[in-house]
Amino acid sequence: MFPIGDDDSTVLNTPVVNYALIVANILVFLVELSVGDAFVEKWAFIPSHFSQSPATEWPTIFTAMFMHGGWMHLFGNMLYLYIFGDNVEDNFGPAKYLAFYLTAGIAATFAQYVFNTGSSIPNVGASGAIAGVLGAYILMFPKSRVDVLVVRQVISMPAVVVIGFWIVLQLFSGVGSVAETETADTGGIAYMAHVGGFAAGFAIALLFRKRGGPSQTA
């Protein structure tokens, strides 16, 4: 199942933060392409470097969220962010949404880090933060309709089914995941970052969400 859109009928405000995040990810990726490996080495999150010197390496916790391992990696992540992020921002408000997004990304980074503290492979990608967006979305909009491309046919499904399918992939196989958190040297997928980001997003949404508003469908 490949999501291509969702129900935005309840979105009342322009998602300026979500758009800004998409633009920032694209711009950073273009810089990454132009500078090359030196940029990745300096700004990606490398677990072994962080373990040795967290005081100097802490900025990479944030910068790595805006880097990607290739065009498809970028496209998949931005597609998910574009489809699901506007609804979440509309419910939280811009300031809370930005804080939420960054916090989910941090949680995702450390969820992966605790299992690979000595790894020298650079970790890049917005997927952990976007997994947080999915966690918030499934809590607040479980009945919203999501258009998915299945083979050559577009089918409308409840968000809880689409995102639930994504959760199953992360927990059991990971095969077919669109939104990846890549390790730049191997092209692997950091599944614990997905799980950690999703769990953090769901938990934070319990505190941040507006209850009883027009966008609530659960």
Image (cartoon, rainbow, N blue to C red):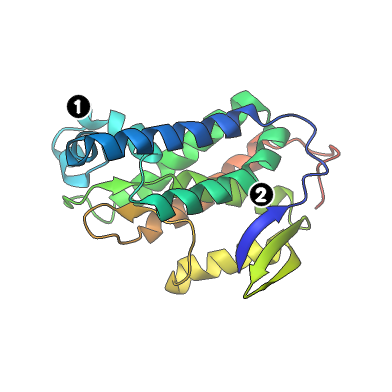
Quadrant of the rendered structure where residue 116 is? bottom left
Residue at 59% x, 51% y is 135
* Amino acid found under the numbered disc labelled 1: Thr
Q: Residues within 10 Å of mark 1 (few under 14, many from 20)?
A: few
Q: Is mark 1 on a helix, strand or loop?
A: helix
Q: What element carries label 2?
A: helix
Is 173 positioned to the left or the right of 98 in the image? left
Is 56 drawn above or below residue 202 in the view shown?
Answer: above
Residue on which disc 2 sits? 137
User: What x and y, as percent, mark residue 189?
Assistant: 35, 60
Q: Along the polypeptide, which appears first: circle 2 or circle 1?
A: 1
User: What x and y, as percent, mark residue 91?
Assistant: 72, 35
* Amino acid found under the numbered disc labelled 2: Tyr
Is 136 positioned to the left or the right of 194 in the image? right
Quadrant of the rendered structure where residue 60 is? top left
Disc 2/disc 1 C-alpha distance (Å): 34 Å
Can you say which quadrant of the picture contains the N terminus?
bottom right
Residue at 48% x, 64% y is 177
User: What x and y, as percent, mark residue 201?
Assistant: 56, 45
Q: Residue 56 carries which label?
A: 1
